[in-house]
């Protein structure tokens, strides 16, 4: 299989994946754009190194972006990205949660960083931080009414949305990582996430990526796009053209 991976061109592999319907986040977002989704303001929570925002700029080039990332080590890179498009990108170095000003211990481990602890020991560095609320930062930066929110925070997504319920209520679409296995302690599982989003009028629109754990290939996480039940992107009830 590794030999095939090396000799098959990347363009052909991508074509085959799309033909077979293999989930792909940016294909799904591009498809939303083609179906009429036009966000003006986008919040990227868990921006890490800014690659998601950069990719989104190719799909929604006229939108304004607010990147929020807690890792101090990413400040320089994200600040540089902000400076490259000062009228379009805003960056805030902050750890979000339900309660503004609450002290927490942050398990810092690059892309696996989380406020939640895992059930088994990890190489995470424990860092004391203070939570900020999504509501407070959105108001400070002029993003009180975003059209689209993306969250990638290793199981802490609902706590962040609880700290931004007013922001969520005006949002049209949300992309978030959802767990099926509780690798982290107290992580909300998929049924709880769907129930929470339904209370704000959201339904699942697309499942755009899958992650299986190496241990047994069990499905660990999926990236789900939620949209408002009455969003125009759901209006067409036909099966085919």
Image (tube, rainbow, N blue to C red):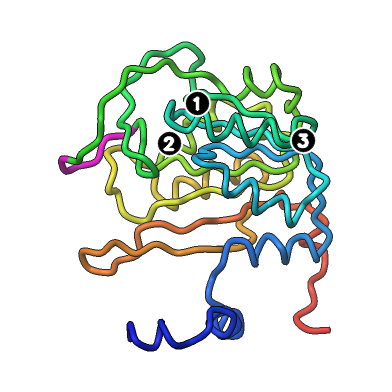
1 vs 3, front mark: 3
Quick check: can you spot residue 7? yes
Sequence-earlier tag: 1 or 2: 1
Left or right placement of residue 194 versus residue 30 in this view: left
Q: Nearer the viewer, mark 2 or mark 3?
A: 3
Residue 117: image x %, image y %? Answer: 26, 35
| Of pointers 1 and 3, the one earlier in the residue sequence | 3
- The location of residue 93, given as percent across then percent down, is 53, 24
Mark 1–mark 2 contact, CB under 8 Å? yes
Using a 10 Å C-alpha cutoff, classify the residue at mark 2 as few (fewer than 14 neighbours), some (14 to 19) or many (20 or more): many
Does 117 lie within the magenta span? yes
Q: Which residue is mark 2?
A: 156
In the image, the segment drawn in magenta is: 116-121
Q: Which residue is mark 1?
A: 96
Out of 89 and 121, give the one closest to the viewer.
Answer: 89
Of 80 and 51, nearer the camera is 80
Which residue does the image show at 33% across and 82% down from the upper left? Answer: 2
Of the numbered discs 2 and 3, the one sitting upstream in the chain is 3
Q: Secondary structure at mark 3?
A: loop
Which SS class for mark 2?
Answer: loop
Relative height, residue 172 to residue 101 (above, below): below
């Amino acid at each position: 299989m590794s030999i095939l991976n090396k000799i098959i061109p990347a363009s052909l592999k991508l074509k085959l994946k799309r033909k077979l319907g293999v989930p792909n986040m940016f294909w799904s977002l591009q498809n939303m754009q083609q179906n009429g989704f036009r966000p003006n303001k986008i919040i990227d929570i868990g921006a890490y190194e800014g690659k998601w925002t950069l990719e989104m700029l190719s799909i929604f080039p006229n939108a304004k972006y607010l990147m929020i990332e807690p890792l101090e080590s990413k400040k320089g890179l994200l600040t540089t990205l902000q400076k490259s498009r000062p009228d379009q990108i805003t960056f805030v170095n902050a750890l979000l949660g339900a309660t503004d000003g609450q002290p927490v211990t942050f398990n810092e481990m690059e892309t696996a960083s989380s406020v939640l602890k895992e059930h088994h020991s990890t190489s995470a560095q424990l860092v004391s931080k203070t939570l900020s609320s999504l509501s407070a930062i959105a108001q400070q930066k002029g993003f009180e009414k975003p059209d689209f929110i993306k969250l990638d925070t290793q199981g802490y997504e609902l706590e962040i949305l609880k700290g931004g319920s007013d922001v969520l209520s005006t949002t049209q679409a949300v992309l978030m990582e959802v767990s099926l296995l509780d690798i982290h302690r107290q992580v909300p599982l998929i049924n709880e996430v769907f129930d929470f989003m339904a209370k704000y009028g959201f339904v699942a629109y697309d499942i755009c990526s899958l992650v299986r754990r190496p241990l047994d290939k069990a499905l660990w996480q999926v990236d789900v796009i939620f949209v408002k039940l009455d969003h125009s992107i759901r209006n067409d009830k036909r099966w085919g053209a």
